[in-house]
Image (cartoon, helix red, strand yellow):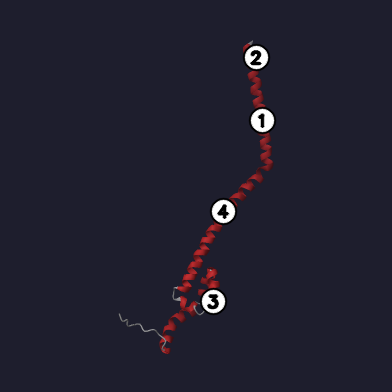
Amino acid sequence: MIWQQLGIELARVALSVILTSIIVLFTLGEMIKKQGPEFAKMLLKMDTKQLEQLHSAEARVSKTANQMVAKDLMTVTPLSELAKHLSEDTRLYLQAHPEALPGILQNYAGTVDLALTLAPRIQEVLGLAKSEKQNFDL
């Protein structure tokens, strides 16, 4: 008799657990069907925001590097002699927007090359050339 009652109680518990599990899983499944796409979109937006932040950081680093190179090109290279003849606004603009520099150099490459080639000769003719040999008295 005790074994029968124990078996009946175990069967009730098992049946209750099974029914509860079915109800919970069914309810969870319905909730996921309704809110699953919204939840997935929310997760994708989070990933997109993180990717945008990463891209933004890379863009800032790249822009800063380009600005530094543009500034160096316009101050310490042979182009600096030509850049001195540009207005201050133009120099500052090109330093702030270095992405424009390659296009400008390509557009005016012939002029720049000609100027760099002819400038020393013109200086010689005008007597403005610096002598290659300088005497230093020590």
Figure quadrant of the C terminus = bottom left
- Residue at x-position 62% and y-position 13%: 3
Q: Which comes before the other along the chain, label 1 or label 4?
A: 1
Amino acid type shown at disc 2: Gln
Figure quadrant of the N terminus = top right
Q: Along the horizontal axis of the image, is 41 left or right of 118?
A: right
* Residue indicated by mark 3: 88
Amino acid type shown at disc 3: Glu
| Extreme residue toward the top, this view | 1
At label 2, counting other C-alpha atoms closer than 10 Å, the crowd grade (few under 14, some 14-19, many 20 or more) is few
Q: Which comes before the other along the chain, label 4 or label 3?
A: 4
* Residue indicated by mark 4: 51
* Residue indicated by mark 1: 22
* Residue indicated by mark 2: 5
Q: Which comes before the other along the chain, label 1 or label 2?
A: 2
Whole-percent x, y for residue 55 in the image = 55, 57
| Tag 2 and tag 4, C-beta contact below 8 Å | no
At label 4, counting other C-alpha atoms closer than 10 Å, the crowd grade (few under 14, some 14-19, many 20 or more) is few
**Is 134 drawn above or below residue 102 in the view shown?**
below
| Tag 3 and tag 1, C-beta contact below 8 Å | no
Q: Which comes before the other along the chain, label 2 or label 4?
A: 2
